[in-house]
C-alpha cells in the first residue's frame, strides 16, 4: 500500500430504520453523522483519538459544509464513506467526502471546512498545535474551498418554529451537535414539501455554537431556484445559515 492510499479513509455503514424518515429514506443528519464518524476514525488512525483530543483540550469545529446528493439513501442500504484531508490554508482545514452505495455508485459528495479549537477558551488554534501530522490526499478532490452561505438580502424569511437546546442535542463538548443543526433545517419544511420536492443537497455555515438552554428561532424562505434558505437566530446572534437544495421533479409528457 502506497502512502497516498493510506491517507484515504474508507468506512462502511448500514442504514437502519432508526436512521430514516417517514419516507424510509436516510435522514440528512444521518449522512452528516456518518461523515463525522468517518472523519473521527481517519484522524484516530493517524494516532490521535477523540479521547486524546479531549484530554489535550482540543476539538474540531466545522465552519461550512457543502453536500451534493445524486440520490437519497434507502433503509437497509450499505454505504461506503471515503474521506480525506485536503490540507490546511492558514488555520482552516478542508476535508472532502464521497459516499457510495453497495454497487459502488456515488450517492453523495461533500466539501467541508474545519478549525482546530481550544475547547475551554473557544479559540482557534494554529495547525502546529495538533500533535500529529495530517498530510493531504492528492489523488482526488470534490472541489475548491466552499464559500460560506449567503442568504440573498431581498428574500423575506418567515418564522417556522422555535427550538430550545436540551440534553438530546448536545455533543461531548456541551454544544449542539453539528448534525442536529441539519435536523433543525429539515424541520422547517412541511411533510407536503418533503413529499413533493426532490432533495439534492445542503449548504450550511455554522456561525455561533449553541449551548444548553439556548433558544433558537428558525426562519425560512419560500422555495427559490437554489432551494429553501434557513437561518437560526436568537438573543441577537445568528447561529447558522443554510440552504436546503430542493427542486420540483421534472415531469415527462
Image: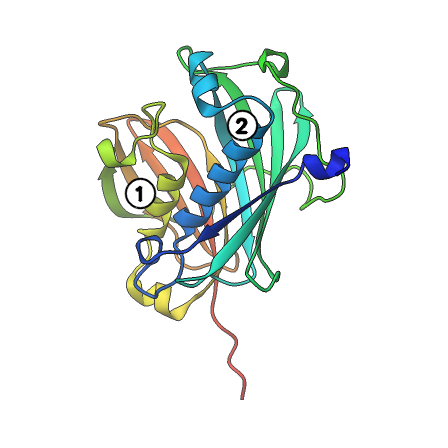
Quadrant hosting residue 189: bottom left
Q: Decide which of tag 1 and tag 2 comes sooner along the chain.
A: 2
Q: Which mark is residue 169?
A: none
- Point out the frontmost of discs 1 and 2: 2
Q: Residue furthest front?
A: 1
Q: Which mark is residue 218?
A: 1
Q: Secondary structure at mark 2?
A: helix
Position of 32 with respect to 69 (left or right) is: left
Q: Mark 2 sits on what residue?
A: 44
Q: Give the percent coordinates (x, y) of residue 8.
A: 66, 39
Q: Residue furthest bottom?
A: 253
Instruction: Compare residues 191 and 114 and report the one nearer the observer.
Output: 114
Q: Give the percent coordinates (x, y) of residue 199.
A: 46, 61
Q: Give the percent coordinates (x, y) of residue 166.
A: 22, 33
Question: The N terminus is located in which quarter?
Answer: top right
Q: Residues within 10 Å of mark 1 (few under 14, many from 20)?
A: many
Image vertical order of residue 253 relative to residue 48, above or below? below
Image vertical order of residue 85 relative to residue 218, above or below? above
Question: Looking at the image, which residue is at 70% across and 44% down?
Answer: 141
Question: The C terminus is located in which quarter?
Answer: bottom right
Amino acid at each position: 500500500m502506497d502512502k497516498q492510499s493510506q491517507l484515504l479513509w474508507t468506512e462502511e455503514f448500514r442504514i437502519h430504520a432508526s436512521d430514516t424518515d417517514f419516507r424510509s429514506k436516510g435522514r440528512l443528519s444521518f449522512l452528516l453523522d456518518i461523515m463525522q464518524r468517518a472523519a473521527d476514525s481517519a484522524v484516530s488512525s493517524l494516532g490521535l483519538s477523540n479521547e486524546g483530543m479531549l484530554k489535550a483540550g482540543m476539538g474540531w469545529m466545522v465552519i461550512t459544509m457543502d453536500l451534493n446528493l445524486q440520490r437519497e439513501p434507502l433503509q437497509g442500504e450499505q454505504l461506503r464513506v471515503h474521506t480525506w484531508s485536503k490540507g490546511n490554508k492558514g488555520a482552516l482545514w478542508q476535508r472532502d467526502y464521497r459516499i457510495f452505495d453497495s454497487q459502488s455508485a456515488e450517492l453523495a459528495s461533500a466539501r467541508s471546512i474545519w478549525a482546530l479549537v481550544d475547547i475551554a477558551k473557544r479559540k482557534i488554534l494554529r495547525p502546529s498545535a495538533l500533535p500529529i501530522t495530517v498530510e493531504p490526499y492528492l489523488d482526488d478532490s470534490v472541489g475548491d474551498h466552499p464559500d460560506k452561505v449567503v442568504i440573498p438580502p431581498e428574500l423575506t424569511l418567515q418564522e417556522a418554529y422555535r427550538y430550545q437546546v436540551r440534553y438530546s442535542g448536545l455533543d461531548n463538548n456541551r454544544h449542539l451537535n453539528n448534525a442536529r443543526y441539519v435536523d433543525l433545517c429539515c424541520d422547517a419544511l412541511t411533510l407536503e414539501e418533503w413529499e413533493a420536492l426532490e432533495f439534492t443537497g445542503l449548504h450550511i455555515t455554522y456561525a455561533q455554537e449553541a449551548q444548553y438552554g439556548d433558544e433558537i428561532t428558525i426562519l425560512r424562505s419560500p422555495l427559490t431556484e437554489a432551494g429553501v434558505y434557513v437561518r437560526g437566530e436568537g438573543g441577537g446572534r445568528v447561529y447558522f445559515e443554510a440552504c436546503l437544495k430542493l427542486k420540483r421533479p421534472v415531469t415527462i409528457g
